[in-house]
Amino acid sequence: MTKFVTAVFDTNILVRLRLAKSKAIRKLWDALLAGEFELITSESILAELDRVLHYPRIFDSNRLSDESVAEFIDTLRRKAVLIEELYEVWRVDEDETDNMFLAAALETYADYLVSEDKHLRAIKYYHGVQIVGLAQFQKEIGL
């Protein structure tokens, strides 16, 4: 890795981190814990993550507990940079919750917004923030 990068992860990427079903995702989690890149997040993003992790199809099928979800979110709160949420963005109409990820990336001049969401990926760049998929981000940081 040649440069320290900053990134915002959307909810689906954060859910993948929690479920850690692949070696590549576990390597990404380890890289975050080791401080190999800086994750940018907000209380709104973490609240959305908490809500999604409690969907029965995710919560029950992955045998999650309230405690394990809270512990994961608490770890993110400690390891990530929590922004003040000073910006509002209205760029994505198809799923308005996607706008909070753009706002977080814009507020911090993040290098990347990591998402597999087609509405976000279609934008590609947003005020200097590159919007990439998970595989591309992992390649960019040398995983």
Image (cartoon, helix red, strand yellow):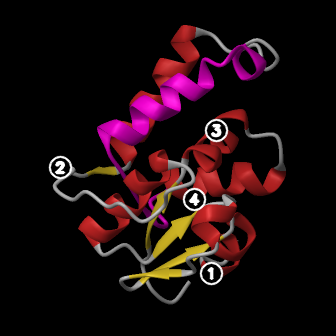
Residue 31, numbered circle: 4
Residue at the farthest bottom position: 2
The alpha-carbon separation of the residues under discs 1 and 4 comes to 13 Å
Quarter holding the C terminus is bottom right
Task: Tell me the kind of residue under disc 3.
Answer: Val
76 vs 116, left or right, is left
- What residue is shown at x 63% (from left), y 70% (from top)? 121
| Badge 4 density bin: few <14, some 14–19, many ≥20, Cα 10 Å | some
Could you give the CA–CA distance between mark 2 and mark 4, rounded to whole angstroms?
24 Å
**Marks 4 & 3, CB-CB < 8 Å contact:** no
Q: Amino acid at mark 1?
A: Glu
Mark 2 Cα shell of 10 Å, populated few (<14), some (14-19), many (≥20): few
Q: Circle 4 — which element?
A: helix
CA separation in Å, label 3 and label 1:
21 Å
* Residue type, mark 2 in image: Glu
Residue 5 in the image: state x and y as whole percent: 44, 76
Which portion, as a residue range, is magenta?
34-59
Circle 3/circle 1 CB separation < 8 Å: no
Q: What is the number of the mark on residue 15?
A: 3
**In this image, 10 relative to 91: left or right?**
right
Q: Taking 129 as reference, is 143 above or below it?
A: above
Query: Residue 111: where, in percent of width, then height?
Result: 43, 78
Identified at 74% across, 40% down, the residue is: 20
Give the residue number, with chain letter if any, for mark 2.
Answer: 84
Whichever of labels 2 and 4 marks the residue nearer the N terminus, that label is 4
SS of the residue at dot 2?
Answer: loop
Let me know if residue 114 is in the magenta part.
no
**Disc number placed over residue 140 in the picture, else none:** 1
